[in-house]
Image (cartoon, grey):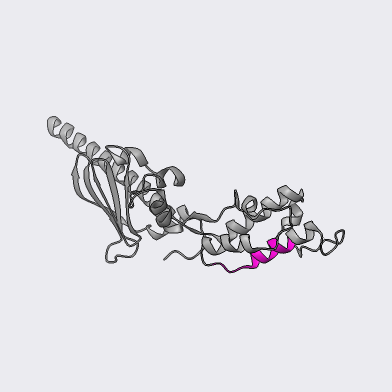
């Protein structure tokens, strides 16, 4: 659903939910049911449901359940404009083990893969930052065509041009690339970035903290209003 890269995820979420209103459906201790929705449409709406030790977000951006502390509102906290993707993803409930969580929260990222591959090559070959620009033709007039440096450059160029649909295809391509004899495909793969957190997952994390802030603000306003009415009643 989120395809544009024009905005960062936090800004994108705020734009998507700019006209949402908070509805508190249930508010009984840690048993809560909140709804964030623009009146008249279900576009980008989401519900947040909590019970002891758990928080579930469900709606137009999928269903996600987290578990860590008794009151998960305290775990996530309110809006700060920042999210802890790695730590919070570890609290995502999905089957057994971390592989299921990663499958939901992460996806293959070719730009990150190519960038990390170039950085790895730069470390081995001690290239300058200018050599890693996107428009670099990778020609090296100081090296013969069969030199190790030229072979590595060619391998990296072909890998970055690859159109891999998932991280497994990228892994296989690295292992099958024509590296120099002194290069190990295993060593090349070590430390490369194949997957990053999805836009949907990051959007949801920002949405959770946004709704929590809205909830606390509403509670504060209600409390202030109750106090005002009580004082006014006594004065009368």
Pinpoint residue 101: horizontal percent, then vertical percent.
39, 52
Figure check: 166 above or below 125: below
Q: Nearer the viewer, residue 164 or 135?
A: 164
**Residue 2 left/right relative to 67:** right
**Residue lying at the far front of the rendered structure:** 181
Q: Is residue 162 visible?
A: yes
The residue located at (34%, 49%) in the rendering is 96
Q: Is residue 69 above or below residue 157?
A: above
Q: Name the image quarter holding residue 61.
A: bottom left
The quadrant holding residue 194 is: bottom right
Is residue 173 covered in magenta? Answer: no
Q: Is residue 82 visible?
A: no
Q: Is residue 199 left or right of residue 213?
A: right
Total tally of numbered discs in the picture: 0
| Residue 57: % across, % down | 30, 53
Q: Position of residue 120 (x, y in %)?
A: 67, 51
> Looking at the figure, which quarter contains the N terminus?
bottom left
Which image quarter is the C terminus in?
Answer: top left
Q: Which residues are magenta?
A: 153-164
Residue 135 screen position, x and y as percent:
72, 64
Residue sticking out furthest to the right: 142
Q: Residue at x 71, y 47 (%)?
A: 123
Magenta residues, dominant SS class: helix
Residue 185 is left or right of residue 64, and the answer is right
């Amino acid at each position: 659903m989120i395809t544009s890269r024009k905005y960062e995820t936090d800004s994108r979420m705020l734009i998507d939910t700019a006209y949402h209103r908070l509805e508190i459906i249930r508010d009984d201790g840690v048993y809560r049911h909140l709804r964030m929705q623009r009146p008249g449409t279900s576009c980008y709406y989401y519900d947040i449901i909590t019970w002891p030790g758990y928080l579930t977000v469900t709606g137009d951006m999928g269903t996600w359940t987290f578990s860590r502390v008794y009151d998960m509102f305290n775990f996530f906290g309110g809006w700060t404009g920042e999210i802890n993707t790695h730590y919070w993803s570890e609290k995502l409930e999905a089957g057994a083990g971390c592989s299921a969580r990663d499958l939901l929260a992460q996806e293959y990222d070719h730009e990150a893969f190519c960038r990390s591959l170039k950085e790895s090559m730069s470390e081995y070959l001690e290239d300058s930052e200018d050599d890693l620009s996107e428009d670099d033709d990778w020609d090296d007039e100081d090296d013969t065509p069969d030199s190790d440096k030229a072979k590595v450059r060619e391998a990296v160029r072909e890998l970055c041009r690859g159109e891999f649909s998932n991280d497994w295809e990228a892994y296989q391509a690295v292992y099958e690339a024509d590296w120099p004899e002194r290069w190990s495909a295993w060593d090349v793969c070590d430390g490369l970035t194949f997957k990053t957190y999805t836009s949907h997952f990051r959007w949801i994390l920002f949405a959770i903290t946004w709704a929590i802030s809205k909830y606390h603000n509403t509670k504060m306003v209600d409390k202030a209003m109750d106090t005002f009415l009580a004082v006014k009643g006594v004065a009368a």
